[in-house]
Every structure is written in structure tokens, then in C-alpha cells.
Amino acid sequence: MSDPLLASINAAAHGLFAQSARMRVLSENIANAETTGKTPGADPYQRKIINFENVVDDANGVDMVEAGDISKDTAPFRTEYMPGHPAADDKGYVKLPNVDMTVELADMREASRGYTANTQVIKQARELVSMTIDLLRPSS
Amino acid sequence: MSLSIAMLSPYSLGGAVAPATPATPVPSASSSAAAPQNDFAQTLASMAADAVSTIKAGESTAMAGMKGQASLQHVVQAVMQAEQTLHTVVAVRDKVVGAYLEISRMQI
């Protein structure tokens, strides 16, 4: 596949996949925003961060994006005073996940914008390919 | 598959159809554009094989998507590529058939 238009469709498709992987990770973060531990003093859910990697397609020399390792956010946990909770420590404080809903929602909007941009690239490249093929058809 | 539309150039067509006098020197454009043993029929055949494999890959990816083994993005990309390959093949076929019809209408 040495055609630049087809290569750009391929790169944009990789972008779609990477953005959907990002969406998956941040949906996990949002879903687990209140997930605590079960035993006293146990750590709650730790926020996940996705990293994008640059992967060069050897056959065409095109730089693709790929979702790389998922790392954990090392920011400190929130604590809340809930003495009756099973995960409360001896002072009555429960550790809550270090997930900030505002950050997650902003990240989700960004992933959505990235996804839309990549679909637009595919749409445009497809149109150009179709226009090129149509040159072969007899004009009538 | 690349959109190698340039292979429909009159040089390559002439090389396959009119080798009546082999002693005549071939135009330099033809010898530089295509390898001498790679004639028009072979080019078409390899292109058709390429297209068939692309379409088959699209079908198998679509099947894997139905079973939940491939992501939506991969299925859409593979099916789109198969569709575009089909369009290219149809356009090239129309052009080739048109060329043969044109030759058959020629006055002898």
C-alpha cells in the first residue's frame, strides 16, 4: 500500500482506534470514581492514564499512533471521614480514588474531538480516492 | 493496493497488442516505465489478484467483527478498503473492455 491517500486513511484509522482506547480508559476512571477498598486502610481505585505511542509502519514509512502502556496516576488519594465504612482506618478516614470528574470530562471531550477529526480525515481521503477513480469513467 | 492508473498508458497497451515488428526500437518511455518482461496482461493479472486478496481480507475482518474479535474501526477500515478496491477494479475493467471494443470496431 504505497498510495498516500490509502496510507492516510490507514493512519486515521489507527487514530480512531487510539482515541477509542483512550475513551475506554477514562470511562473506567469515571465508573470507578467512588470505588474504595474493602479492608481498613486499603487503597482505593487508582486513576489510570493512557499513553499514545508513535509507531512507524515499516512497509510505507507512515507514522501511526497506537495506544501504549496504561500507567497509574500517582497523585495522593482523597480522604473522607466515614467511621462506619469497612475501609476506614483507625482514625475513621476512608481513602477515595484520585479521580477528578472535571478532568475526566474534559479528557472525554478531547477524545471525542480527536475521534471526529480522524473520521473527517477518512471521509476526505475517501472522497479524493473516489474522485480519482471516477476519472477513468467515460464522461457522459 | 495502489491506484496505479498510469499502467493504462498507451505505451504499455501498445507493447502488449502490437509487437508485429519486434526489431523496431521500443520507445524509451515504455522501457523505463515498465520492466520488459512485465507486460500489460501480467500487470492486470497481478492487480486482479491483489484486489481479490483485499476483498477477501475485508470479508474475513467483517466476519471477525460479527464474532466480536475485531474492533469496529478495523472492520470499517477493511470493508471500506474492499469497497474502494472493487470500485477501482470495475473502473479499470470498463476501461479495458472499452479499449478492446474500440479495437474491434476498427476498419480492416
Image (tube, coloured by chain):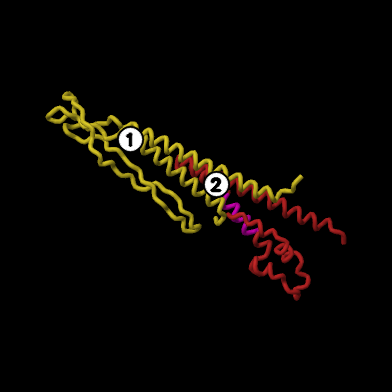
Chain colours: A yellow, B red
Query: Vertical placement of B61 versus B36: above or below?
Result: above
User: What residue would you read off at disc 2?
Assistant: B58
> What's drawn in magenta, residue-wise?
B44-54
Left or right of B99 in this view: A95: left
Task: Determine the residue located farthest toward the right in the rendered image.
Answer: B108
Residue at screen point 55% across, 51% down: A6
Say if residue A105 shows up in the picture: yes
Say if residue B63 shows up in the picture: no
In the rendered image, residue A52 lying in the magenta stretch gets the answer no
Q: Secondary structure at mark 2?
A: helix
> What is the spatial separation of the Cα atoms under label 2 and label 1, in whole angstroms?
34 Å
Left or right of B48 in this view: B58: left
Crowd rating for badge 2 (residues with CA inside 10 Å; few <14, some 14–19, many 20+): many
Q: Which chain letter matches label 1?
A: A
Q: Position of residue A19 (x, y in %)?
A: 43, 41
Q: Position of residue A90 (x, y in %)?
A: 12, 30
Identified by mark 1, the residue type is: Asn
Mark linked to residue A29: 1
